[in-house]
């Protein structure tokens, strides 16, 4: 009987041991499988975030370098270097800053070689915002002020390598903000960190920490209580996953990886107790189970770990979607470049084509296979290649290049091109070295033909029309003055009509020549400090005769006689004369045209007011266009070329000012212009 009880007891013990062993085996299998699954998930999510970080920052730096190498900015800053108060150059820099802003910059400013700010657009972060250094060469920083921003300060160099100025830019990184914001989807204790080492012998680091409670900036020790933090491994250039204590002294499971181009490290971690909580909660159900629970346990593994894995997959998916957006941007860029008429290409340091658009193939009459990967000599031909070598050497030395060349198209017709080369700088180990260049060639054949036609027309107008007309006007004036004897009244009337029409033609010719000078940039301005009131007094005195003929009076209101402007005396007088002439033309008899002068902010405002019928609504949008007149019929009462206001506004804008008007039907019109005060 005892024997049977002993056998039964042994059987029970064996059964208990077997059950316990099976439970432990199931637990061990589940724990190892969980660790394997989570390790792969954490590492995959971290690698996707690392690639996203690098691509976002590199794009911001590339955009900033593109601005710093624009030839137009170099030329304009050279002008400001020689003449710091040049109004036209200052206006051009401001227009350039404004035009760059929609391309993705939060803020952009230009400074001349002396460090003086000459233009600004957008807004910048405060100087005391938390930041870390991205690139010493580009003076680039990663800033946190509620969102991630890349700030750069780049020197602008002329073709000889001399510094002519500086550009400061700030670009937001919205996709990186989203990565930090997605930590709540992984777990309550999940944290994503990007850290930069400090120059203190490897003791501390500055970190951007993305947690459920938000994103913060913190200085953290790399070794705590003799144990290296997971981030320390990343800053040493290592990649992996580890179970260790973090800066909070909490046991965590962390994936770590370096961001080599910027000497940064990146960590994605979650508290170990939260990570294994589903397994610990189910351990009490495992021990009573039999060996068959190993199979059930494997099934439970999917049920218990799947939510956390799904969270990791969601995080990875978000990063992959962000990368997909970048790839879509590249596809869109390819579509855009293929629709542009300009010839675009990228050539590497070995002078081999790595990118070109469709216009490049069509202009050279070559297929994509005949261009892609081929040497410049093979594509351009020996003759053009030899002529291009100096420009290639210059751009590979880091300087933008602009030159012209002529090439026959596939039909044998000669075509003129303006060619621009822009250097491309490398990243990482190639940082600071030119690794290739971008080429853009624009077909200007038709523009040159039109320019020749316009030049021939202007030459004909200037030499073949103005000179004879001037002589005819003089002769008619002498005849009208009685040099040839007293004329009959009928003849005298005809001579006066001919003389007036001759003067009208000469005014039209002079206006056309002024327009040509303005559009070609050949109008020379003799800028100097001018007292505004004496100039206006002289202009009113010169136009009193025309006003008397119209029975219209002129009046000047200028309370402040000390107002000075920086302008060209003759051209400013021309503007005032045009405005007075228009005002007197449309003023009723016995009325007064008033000229009012006042301060306007940091500038001076000049207003010419009349009491005429006002400007029709349908004419207001085109009042400053060339040859624009409210009454363009052959029977109009007031003569004119329709060029005066167009020329006047162009002159004021060249002087760094602006022009506009205010009009009320039946009550009169006020034309005004504003100039910076000297």
Image: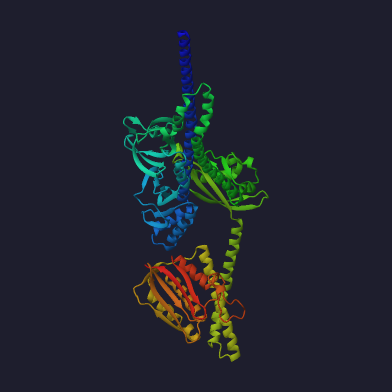
x then y, percent, for residue 528: 39, 67
Q: Residue furthest front?
A: 1
**x, y percentage for residue 74?**
45, 53
Residue at 40 percent of width and 75 percent of height? 597
Residue in the foreground of this view, choosing between 121 and 506: 121
Looking at the figure, which quarter contains the C terminus? bottom left
Residue 420 place in picture, x, y as percent:
53, 50
Q: Is residue 567 visible?
A: no
Residue 210 in the image, given as x and y percentages of width and height: 41, 42
Q: Is residue 491 left or right of residue 278?
A: right
Q: Is residue 116 visible?
A: yes
- Seen in the image, is 406 located left or right of residue 165? right
**Res 494 quadrant in image:** bottom right
Q: Measuring 48% from the left and 32% from the top, which residue is drawn there?
A: 38
Pick the front one: 124 or 524: 124
Identify the image's colour scheme: rainbow, by chain, secondary structure or one colour: rainbow
Say which of 249 and 100 sits in front. Answer: 249
Above or below 497: residue 568: above
Of the pair 287 and 666, the residue shown nearer to us: 287
122 shown above or below 237: below
Tell me where residue 634 sits by quadrant: bottom right
Q: How many marks?
A: 0
């Amino acid at each position: 009987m005892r024997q049977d009880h002993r056998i039964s007891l042994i059987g029970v013990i064996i059964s208990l041991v077997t059950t316990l062993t099976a439970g432990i085996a199931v637990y061990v299998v589940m724990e190892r499988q969980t660790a394997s699954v989570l390790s792969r998930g954490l590492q995959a999510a971290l690698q996707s975030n690392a690639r996203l970080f690098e691509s976002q920052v590199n794009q911001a730096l590339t955009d900033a370098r593109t601005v710093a190498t624009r030839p137009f900015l170099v030329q304009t800053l050279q002008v400001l270097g020689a003449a710091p108060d040049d109004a036209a150059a200052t206006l051009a820099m401001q227009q350039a800053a404004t035009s760059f802003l929609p391309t993705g910059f939060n803020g952009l400013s230009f400074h001349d070689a002396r460090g003086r700010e000459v233009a600004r657009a957008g807004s910048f972060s405060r100087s005391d915002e938390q930041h870390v250094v991205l690139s010493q060469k580009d003076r680039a920083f990663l800033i946190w002020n509620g969102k991630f921003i890349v700030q750069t300060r780049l020197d602008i160099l002329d073709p000889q390598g001399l510094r002519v100025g500086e550009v400061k830019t700030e670009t937001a990184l919205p996709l990186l903000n989203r990565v930090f914001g997605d930590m709540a989807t992984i777990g309550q204790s999940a944290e994503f960190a990007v850290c930069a080492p400090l120059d203190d012998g490897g003791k501390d680091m500055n970190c951007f920490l993305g947690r459920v409670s938000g994103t913060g900036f913190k200085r953290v020790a790399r070794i705590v209580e003799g144990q290296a933090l997971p981030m320390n491994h990343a800053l040493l250039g290592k990649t992996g996953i580890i179970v260790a204590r973090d800066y909070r002294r909490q046991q965590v499971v962390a994936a770590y990886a370096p961001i080599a181009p910027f000497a940064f490290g990146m960590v994605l971690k979650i508290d170990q107790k939260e990570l294994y909580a589903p397994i610990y909660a189910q351990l009490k159900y495992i021990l009573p189970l039999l060996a068959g629970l190993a199979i059930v346990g494997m099934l439970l593994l999917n049920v218990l770990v799947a939510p956390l894995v799904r969270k990791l997959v969601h995080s990875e998916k978000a990063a992959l979607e962000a990368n997909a957006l970048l790839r879509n941007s590249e596809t869109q860029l390819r579509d855009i470049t293929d629709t542009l008429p300009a010839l675009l290409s990228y050539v590497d340091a070995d002078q081999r084509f790595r990118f070109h658009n469709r216009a490049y193939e069509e202009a050279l009459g070559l297929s994509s296979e005949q261009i892609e990967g081929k040497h410049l000599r093979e594509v351009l031909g020996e003759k053009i290649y030899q002529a291009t070598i100096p420009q290639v050497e210059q751009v590979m030395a880091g300087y933008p290049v602009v030159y012209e060349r002529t090439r026959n198209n596939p039909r044998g017709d000669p075509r003129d091109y303006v060619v621009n080369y822009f250097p491309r700088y490398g990243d990482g180990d190639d940082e600071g070295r030119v690794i290739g260049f971008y080429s853009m060639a624009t077909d200007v054949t038709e523009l040159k033909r039109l320019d020749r036609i316009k030049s021939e027309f202007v030459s004909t107008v200037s030499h073949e029309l103005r000179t004879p007309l001037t002589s005819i006007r003089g002769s008619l004036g002498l005849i009208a003055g009685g040099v040839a004897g007293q004329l009959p009244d009928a003849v005298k009337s005809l001579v006066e009509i001919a003389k007036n029409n001759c003067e009208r033609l000469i005014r039209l010719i002079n206006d056309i020549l002024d327009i040509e000078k303005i559009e070609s940039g050949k109008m020379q301005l003799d800028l100097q400090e001018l007292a505004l009131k004496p100039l206006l007094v002289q202009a009113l005195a010169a136009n009193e005769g025309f006003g008397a003929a119209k029975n219209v009076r002129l009046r000047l209101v200028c309370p402040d006689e000390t107002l000075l402007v920086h302008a060209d005396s003759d051209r400013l007088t021309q503007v005032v004369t045009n405005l007075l002439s228009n005002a007197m033309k449309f003023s009723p008899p016995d009325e007064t045209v008033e000229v009012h002068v006042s301060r306007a902010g940091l500038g001076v405002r000049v207003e010419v007011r009349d009491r005429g019928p006002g400007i029709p609504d349908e004419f207001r949008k085109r009042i400053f266009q060339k040859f624009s007149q409210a009454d363009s019929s052959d029977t109009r009462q007031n003569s004119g070329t329709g060029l005066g206001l167009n020329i006047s506004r162009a002159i004021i804008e060249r002087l760094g000012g602006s022009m506009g008007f205010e009009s009320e039907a039946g009550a009169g019109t006020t034309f005004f212009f504003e100039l910076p005060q000297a």
